[in-house]
Image (cartoon, helix red, strand yellow):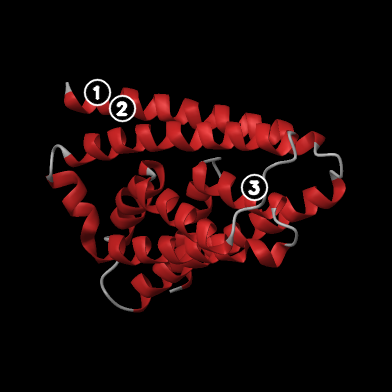
């Protein structure tokens, strides 16, 4: 049981560490909201969405991804369009912040964006379904699989909470918005690079 828990915890930690749209959005919400608690709608939505994906993947959805030939490139293509849009939104968000005309996202908008990033982001979906689902299949239904899945879910909740807290803490130190400006620009560029990578992967899968 302990080995299964550690397996899930280490695997999920390795998957969530790379910078992606989910992580960037949660961090930005922590930094742009007036307090940490006001970024919780984004944190909770992303964590619940990840929880559902992990459970579904552990129940065997990963088999579906690999058995339908066009499903992976379709996910990549949808992700490319989505990521370019998210990158542009973050870039424009920074410009509006500079002009002092941009208000923080409302709780409703946080939920909508966090949900769309979790569901439409091929990086999150393929990592969860393919990697976590495949590793979960090594355990038969019972205490070990439950320990593995619980560890993966725990990592998501801890990571998103920590990202929002760090964003909120940075805002308190960065009173003039100097660091946040560069973080927004770097976030947008990194998301566009990720979109380019997914575009290449989609072409490879279709050829």
For the N terminus, give its image quadrant. bottom left
Let me know if residue 3 appears in the view.
no
In the depicted view, which residue is nearer to us: 35 or 18? 35
Q: Picture coordinates of residue 174 (x, y %)?
A: 84, 43
Q: Nearer the viewer, residue 18 or 116?
A: 116
Residue at which label 3 appears? 28
**How would you rate the neighbour count of disc 2 (Cα within 10 Å): few for under 14, some for 14-19, many for 20 or more?**
some
For label 1, the crowd category at 10 Å Cα-Cα, with few meaning under 14, some 14 to 19 and many 20 or more, is few
Q: Quadrant of residue 146?
A: bottom left
Q: Residue furthest front?
A: 101
Q: Which residue is mark 2?
A: 201
Does 70 appear above or below 128? Answer: above
Query: Which residue is under mark 1?
Result: 204
Q: CA distance from mark 1 to mark 2?
A: 5 Å
Residues at circles 1 and 2 in contact by the CB criterion of under 8 Å? yes
Q: Residue 159, located in which quarter of the rendered image? A: bottom right
Looking at the rendered structure, the secondary structure element under dot 1 is helix
- Secondary structure found at label 3: helix
Residue at 45 percent across and 30 percent down: it is 194
Percent from the top left, x then y, of residue 48? 45, 67
Q: Nearer the viewer, mark 3 or mark 1?
A: 3
Determine whether 187 is above or below 33 in the image.
above
Residue 71, quarter of the rendered image? top left
**56 and 149: which is toward the camera:** 56
How far apart are labels 3 and 1 at the CA level?
33 Å
Front residue (pair 90, 20): 90
> Going 35% across and 60% down the picture, which residue do you hit?
53
Residue found 56% across the figure and 27% down from its top: 189
Residue 58 in the image: state x and y as whole percent.
30, 64
Q: Would residue 187 be visible to someone looking at this image?
A: yes
Alpha carbon separation for disc pair 2 and 3: 28 Å
Q: Earlier in the sequence, mark 3 or mark 1?
A: 3
């Amino acid at each position: 049981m302990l080995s299964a828990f550690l397996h899930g915890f280490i695997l999920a930690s390795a998957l969530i560490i790379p910078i992606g749209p989910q992580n960037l959005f949660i961090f930005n919400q922590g930094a742009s909201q007036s307090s940490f608690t006001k970024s919780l709608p984004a944190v909770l939505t992303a964590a619940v969405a990840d929880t559902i994906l992990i459970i579904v993947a552990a129940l065997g959805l990963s088999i579906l991804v690999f058995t339908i030939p066009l499903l992976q490139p379709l996910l990549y293509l949808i992700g490319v369009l989505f990521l370019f849009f998210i990158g542009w939104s973050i870039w424009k968000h920074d410009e509006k912040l500079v002009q002092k005309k941009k208000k923080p996202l409302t709780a409703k908008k946080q939920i909508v964006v966090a949900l769309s990033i979790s569901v439409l982001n091929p990086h999150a979906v393929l990592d969860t379904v393919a990697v976590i689902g495949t590793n979960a299949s090594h355990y038969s239904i019972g205490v070990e699989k439950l320990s593995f899945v619980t560890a993966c879910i725990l990592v998501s909740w801890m990571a998103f909470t920590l990202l929002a807290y760090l964003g909120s803490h940075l805002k308190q130190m960065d009173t003039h918005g100097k660091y946040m400006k560069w973080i927004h620009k770097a976030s947008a560029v990194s998301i566009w690079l990720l979109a380019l990578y997914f575009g290449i992967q989609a072409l490879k899968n279709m050829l």
